Image (cartoon, coloured by chain):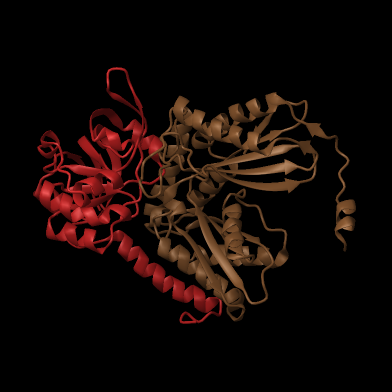
Chain colours: A red, B brown
Amino acid sequence: MAHYHIQSPLADELIETLRAGDTVSIDGHIFGIRDANLIRLFDQKVELPPDLIAQLKGAIGLHTAPNVKKLENGKYKKICVGTTTSYRMDRFTRGLFKTYGLKAIAGKGGLLEDGCQACVDLKGCYLTVIGGAAALETLQIEDIEEVWWEDLMPEAIWKFRVKNFGPLIVSIDCHGNNLYRNIKAQAKKNMEHVLAELGIKSDQ
Amino acid sequence: MTDRMILADQQDYSEVWDVDDSFYQNVEEVCKTLYIESLKDLPPDVREALQNAYKREELDSGKRILKTLIENVDKADEHHMLICQDTGIPIYFVKIGSEVRFDGRRLEQAIRRGTERATLEHPLRSSICHTLTRKNTGTSTGYRIPVIHYEFVQGNQVEILNVPKGSGSENMSYLKCLTPAEGSDGIKKFVLECVFESGANPCPPTIVGIGIGGSADLCVALAKKASVREVGSQNPDPHVRALEDELYEAINQLGIGAHGLGGSTTALAVHIEEAHTHMTMNPVAVNMMCWPARRRRATFSPGEAVSITY
């Protein structure tokens, strides 16, 4: 298990290097994506603004809808930026990797089977942010540089400039390793043991 | 026992408090404060539970994650920042003293306005939207939101407990109507399955709130009531308390751990609230509270300053 200090955008070679259990800290940019904007993009088939598309190759998407304050100059000030549960957005992972060239999703709780397979098929990875620990996360964000689809507030698309963001845990890699799956498999065995100790048949 | 006897039994001799207009204004101001402060300042019992989990954890990765949670709370203190970005669905538990004379509708409006003002004036993220159109109200309130639970108690005080409930844990909520034949074994198995299925999603280590008995709707409300209890508090019924202890041990043997990435603390606490039920029923509900178990409480008394606690 190694730690990598990485710079976005990410290249395929870097993704291949990362293994489940490694940690990363990130400099560069991270794009905030979320239920409403992904539904608009993939289900309602509204195309992204061209200037955003141009920035997404090799990008890292973060599952978030931040607390912000709009300033008079139109910019947004961060109040609290944290990470939400990823399974709700799992079905968009493949499309983000394939159509827009994202290389990593940062979120909490892991991806479902298709998202994991998309990491293998399209050389991507899933980075775990510790959920609820948003004060730390917010302090690692230097600025909110741009925002698209503001009408979906707070589920707009956000561009954050980050410095030493993390450490995030590589929990799903492009080689098919998945820390969450491993823990769940072990917990299933543990549960059979616990039920037996309680004198409860597991098939009851 | 007749109804009359019950009333005589529970007679309360505290002075009647007939509230005036300033009470509602006070509730509005205090509810604004409760919502903001609950998002920033974690209750001491939760802090202690996290520290204990950190000391107890043997797995290196789990220990690192627990340390991150504690550091996050420290940073939130230092910078007076929100602990988590999810300002939650605003939930209030209100205890009304039997000797308080008030207008319930105005009280409810004051709670709602306080919630809205916290959201607009801080500002906080509003997470409340129409269920079908998904249009965000922008105020953290909406039709039938905030959620307000009322309880009537003896005395001449009003207590308001604010709980901003994040969706990560609230989405991991369960109800099952078991048969009486499935007994307490069925309850234990269902709870373990819920915790297992939820995995990393509710931001463990969680407080596992469990409701048993009642009707289906009451059972779910009891699970919520259990999830907001102080960490370390115990149910006074010895049968229920024994089940709390047994499930606490069992859940923490699952190995799901902090953030679902393994370790010995999956639950900081297991709380159960019970109601009697129908002889043919055996309902059980599970409602989990994420590791930042945020809450803030205010007590209003006649002629005294408001007391704000956890």
Residue B299 drawn above or below residue B187: above
For image coordinates 46% across by 82% down, the residue present is: A203
Q: Residue at x 53, y 42 (%)?
A: B146
The percent coordinates of residue B127 (x first, y second) are 41, 41
Q: Residue visible at 58% across and 69% down? A: B283
Q: Is residue A20 visible?
A: no
| Picture mark count | 0
Q: Quadrant of residue A87?
A: bottom left
Relative to A91, say whether A25 is above or below.
above
> x, y (%) of residue B88?
46, 43
Q: Of residues B210 and A167, which is closer to you in this image?
A: B210
> Where's residue A15, x and y in %?
15, 51
- Quarter-of-image position of residue B19: top right
* Left or right: B23 as drawn, with respect to B268: right
Residue at the image point whose x is 47% and y is 79% from the top: A202
Q: Determine if residue B291 is in view.
A: yes
User: x, y percentage for residue A27?
Assistant: 21, 35
Relative height, residue B235 to residue A77 (above, below) = below
Left or right side of B121 for B238: right
